[in-house]
Amino acid sequence: MGAKSEARDVAPPDEPAAPPAVLAHGGKVLPAVTVDTYNEELRDEEGFVGDRASRRAFRAILADWRDRLRERGDDPFGDLPTEEITKSKLDKMLASADPVSAGLVHTVVEEFAGELATVVRRFLRLPSWKGTQRIVIGGGMIASRIGELAMGRASIMLAADGVTIELVAIQNHPDEAGLIGAVHLAPSWVMAGHDAILAVDIGGTNVRAGVVELNAGKRGEIKEADVWKRQHWRHADDGPERDEAIEKIGAMINKLIERAEDEKIKLAPFMGIGCPGLIDDHGFILKGGQNLPGNWEGRDFSLAAALSAHLPKVGGHDVFILIHNDAVVQGLSEVPNMKDVEHWGVMTIGTGLGNARFTNRE
């Protein structure tokens, strides 16, 4: 493969960071980490480099190999459409006694692992990713055996090329990591005296909303946060307009608030939201929201304001909403597990490839 030219859209600037005086959407300096960069959009002549390690890319590789086998009449999936083949079905086939079935899945995983390794190499060339010691792999795919194998195989490929980097699977379940990470968006004083916060994870296919219990230590540090209750909506199946989507998300949050009140859980009047794209300090999605239902990008739409209109007061106060990129928030769920490194990143395998890079603060 010949050399490829690259262009990229740089996210937050790289000037020296100072602790923020106020809470801000898309913040660069957070309580536990500095967000060195996120939402990097590397390009070559084939398009976005990150798309080569997305869920869509995996499906495309699977479809290609099925076509090759079908020419011989050996496609083990028969007439089942590729988009209907679940991760669990692939995991079962991987362990199958049928060598063709297991071999097909192994071949697809191997090819996808090669693409993932290529993407990691490209990111590590960026100045903003220089010195990265560990990359957390998130997204729903990593919760499957095929995802684990792809990550492991990519690690071996990188090591064979002399690339020093540790790839690890996200510790919390991918469906909950994007909620748990929200507790690291705000300083501890925001949550002082409360049991839990509200969190929303908005993706290109799904929306998840939850109540995240803080389980804070005596000094207010958050180490054992977990999801108490959550709601899930696969908006890609419904194809709603933007306003319909906001109304649906508001209804999900209202149900969670009611359940928390019924169970005497003291909610903080705070909600963290993870959302695709580049988020400015006013909470506007500047770009990268193309997979969301309707047009969410630009300065004529405020997600925080639109959602606030559907929310009740919590503890007598309006809910303060803080928005950041969804890969950043998912990565923040790993803060308690990253104390032994200084520079680390996250890549989330989803509709696209989310990415963020962090430096721990003292």
Image (cartoon, rainbow, N blue to C red):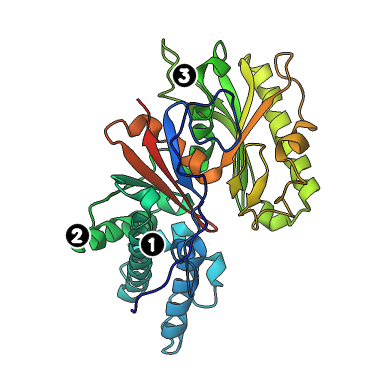
Q: Is residue 156 above or below residue 317?
A: below
x 35%, y 47%: residue: 135
Disc marking residue 162: 2
Q: Amino acid at mark 1?
A: Val
Q: Earlier in the sequence, mark 3 or mark 1?
A: 1
Instruction: Give the number of the mark in front: 3 or 1.
Output: 1
Q: Is residue 128 above or below residue 78?
A: above
Q: Is residue 32 above or below residue 279?
A: above
Residue 164 in the image, given as x and y percentages of width and height: 22, 52
x 74%, y 36%: residue: 307
Q: Earlier in the sequence, mark 2 or mark 3?
A: 2
Q: Quadrant of residue 351?
A: bottom right
Q: Secondary structure at mark 3?
A: loop
x 46%, y 78%: residue: 64
Query: Label 1: which residue?
Result: 119
Q: Is residue 77 left or right of residue 113?
A: right
Q: Quadrant of residue 98?
A: bottom left
Inter-mark Cα distance, 3 to 1: 36 Å
